Image (cartoon, grey):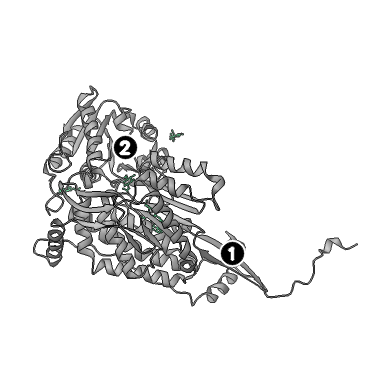
Amino acid sequence: MLLVRRPLVRCLVWFRHLSSAATVEVENEPCLNYLKGSEERQKVEEALKEMRSKTEEIPCVIGGEEIFTGDVHYQVCPHNHQHKLAKFHYASADHIRLAIDRALAIRAGWEKRPMAERADIFLEAARLLSEKYRYKMLAATMLGQGKNIQQAEIDAAAELIDFWRWNAKHSLDLQKQQPISTEGVTNSIIYRGLEGFVAAVSPFNFTAIGGNLSGAPALMGNVVLWKPSDTAMLSSWIAYNIMREAGVPEGVINFVPADGPTFGDAITSSPHLAGINFTGSVQTFQHLWRQVGQNLGLYKTFPRLVGECGGKNYHFVHSSADLESVANGTIRSAFEYGGQKCSACSRMYVPSSMWPKLKDELLTRVKEVKMGDADDFTTFISAVIDDKSFGRIKNWLEHAKSSSNLKVIAGGNCDDSRGYFVEPTIIETSDPKEKIMQEEIFGPVLTVYPYPDEKYREVLEMVNETSPFGLTGAVFAKDVNVVKEAHEILKMSAGNFYINDKSTGSVVMQQPFGGARLSGTNDKAGGPHYVLKFCSPQAIKESHVPLTDWKYGNMQA
Ligand SMILES: *[C@@H]1O[C@H](CO)[C@@H](O)[C@H](O)[C@H]1NC(C)=O
Ligand SMILES: *[C@@H]1O[C@H](CO)[C@@H](O)[C@H](O)[C@H]1NC(C)=O
Ligand SMILES: *[C@@H]1O[C@H](CO)[C@@H](O)[C@H](O)[C@H]1NC(C)=O
Ligand SMILES: *[C@@H]1O[C@H](CO)[C@@H](O)[C@H](O)[C@H]1NC(C)=O
Ligand SMILES: *[C@@H]1O[C@H](CO)[C@@H](O)[C@H](O)[C@H]1NC(C)=O
C-alpha cells in the first residue's frame, strides 16, 4: 500500500539494499507413473508388503519426549478393516497443557533463528520425502487412507514435497517485501512468528495437508500443537518424523493425537492461543470459534482462525458444452478418491435435451470404474475412510431409494463386511431443491438435475442459492456469452471457479484454494499471501538524524 505513493527510484534503493537477502528457486515435484515392471512400482510393492504385516505403535511426542499414554486407539485399513495398521495413544487434557508449556518454553529460541535456517530445514524435509521416504509414505497413505497409487502419489509425495519447498521459497521472498525508506530514515519490516502457540487440526483426506498444516506455521517461527486425524495417523507420523530428521527442533511441533473435543477445550482455554488452523466439519469449526469467543477475555492476543469446511460443489452444463469433456470430468470429479475431496462434484445440472446422451456416456464409464483394494494397482475407487463415513453415506443411499423424486440410475449399493465399500452412485432428481442437492455427503454419490433448456438463467440463479457452501464449481459451455453470464451469476458461489474443466484438482501456485460462505475463511492456501496469516509483522523505523525541534511552524507568534 505504501509503495504506490513513492516514485520508482525510491523503490530501487531498498531493492539494492536488500539484494544480499537469501532466495531459493524451486520446481514442482514430478509425479512417477508406477507402471508394471518399473523400479518405482517394485519399491512401493515392497513397502506395502512390509506394512501389511505389522501394526506400528505411535506415541504422543511432547517437547521431544515420546509418551505412551495408554489411552490406545487403532487405525485400520479401510478396504480391510481387520488389519490394524497403527496403534496410537491419545493425549489427555493434561498432556495437551504440557505440550503448550513445553512449546512456549522454546518458542523464543526458535523464533529467533534466521528465516533462511528454518527454510533450509524444510527444504531438507522435502528432499528426504522425495528420496528416502517416498515409498513408505505412499504405502501408508494407500493402506491407511484408501488411496490408489496415483491419488497417493499426487498427494503424499508430490504435493507435500511441493508444499515444503514452495513454503520455504515464499518465506524467503516475503522477507524482501519491505517498505520504502526516506532521507535520514530507514524503514523495515520483520516477519515475526505469532506470540503464543498455533493449534493445527488436520483431516484424513490429504496427507499433504497434515504435513503442510503443521509445517507451515513452524517455518514462520511458530510453535505448534498438531492433532492429526485418527484415520491418517500413520502417514502423519511419517511426515512428523521426516520433519524431525530434517532438523525441526524437538518441541517446535508437538504431535498430539487426541479426542477432538478434549483437544478443542484444552487449546481454547489457554491464554496463549495465537491461532487455529482447522480442516473439517462446519459444526466443529463453529464450535471452536464459539469457544474462542467465549474465552476472548482470557487471551493475550486475538487468535487467528483459519478454517476449511467442505462444499457442495456443482457442475453446470449448458447445451453448448462438449459432452465428452463433461462426462470424463464428472466421473473424475465425483468419484475419484470416493468423492472424499472437499472439491468433489456432487450436484450436476444438465439441459434436458442433452441428458439422454450424457446419461448413456456416464453409465458406460461408471461400469468401467473398478472398485477394489487401494493397493491393487488397477483400482480406480477404493473403500471410504471409516465406519462413520460408511454409515452416513449408506443413509443417503437409503434416502435416495425411498424418495419418489429421486431415482438411482447407477450403483446404490454398499457393503462393509470386509472393507467400507460404496459403489459409485448416480442419482437423478426431479426436485433441484431436494436435500441431497444441498447437503454435503462426502462420498461417491452424484445427483443430477435435468433442467428445461430454456430455463438456464433461472437454473444458474438456483445453483447459486441452493447450498450454504461456496467452495468449487464448474461451468461447461462453448458459448462465450453464456460463460460470461454464468460467471456473473455464480460469482459468489465458489472460491475456485472452473470453466470447461472439472471442479477438483487445484495445483499449488496455480489455483490458490479456498472458499467462503460456510466452506471456510477462504485464506487461499496455495497462494503467496497465505503465510502472512501465521506471522505477526513488525514495522521498524530508525532515524539517523537528531530530532531538532518539538514545535511546529504554525505555532510561531
Ligand atoms: C492450514 O490448513 C490448511 C489445510 O486446511 C493447510 O493447507 C495450510 O497449509 C495450513 N496453514 C498453515 C499456515 O498452517
Ligand atoms: C478433507 O476432509 C474434511 C472432512 O474431514 C473436509 O472438511 C475438507 O474439506 C476436506 N479437504 C479437502 C482439501 O478435500
Ligand atoms: C474421455 O475419456 C475416454 C476414455 O478415457 C477417451 O477415450 C476420450 O477421448 C475422452 N474424451 C475427451 C473429449 O477427451
Ligand atoms: C447468490 O446467492 C446469494 C445468497 O443467497 C444472494 O444474496 C445473491 O443475490 C445471489 N446472486 C445472484 C447473482 O443471484
Ligand atoms: C501450505 O502452506 C503454505 C504456508 O502456509 C501455504 O502458503 C500454502 O497455501 C499451503 N498449501 C495448501 C494447499 O494448503
Label 2 sits on residue: 440
Labels in figure, total: 2
Do callouts 1 and 2 mark residues in contact (Cβ within 8 Å)? no
Q: Is residue 215 above or below residue 485?
A: below
Q: In which quadrant of the rendered view does residue 284 lie?
A: top left
Dot placed on the residue nearer the N-terminal end, 1 or 2: 2
Residue 28 position, x and y percent, is 30, 64
Q: Is residue 437 above or below residue 155?
A: above
Q: Quadrant of the N terminus?
A: bottom right
Name the outermost residue toward the front: 70
Name the residue that disc number 1 marks: 539
Image quadrant occupied by the C terminus: bottom right
Residue 104 horizontal side relative to residue 132, left or right:
right
Residue at 21%, 28% (x, y): give it.
Answer: 398
**Which residue appears at 19% of the width and 63% of the height?**
135
Is residue 527 shown to the viewer in this render? no
Residue 557 lies left or right of residue 462; in this view the side is right
Give the amino acid at mark 1. Ala
Q: Tell me where residue 317 sits by quadrant.
A: top left
Where ligand 5 lies, by image quadrant?
A: bottom left
- What is the x, y in percent for residue 215? 37, 61
Q: Which mark is drawn over residue 230?
A: none
- Between 266 and 302, the one lying in front of the other is 266
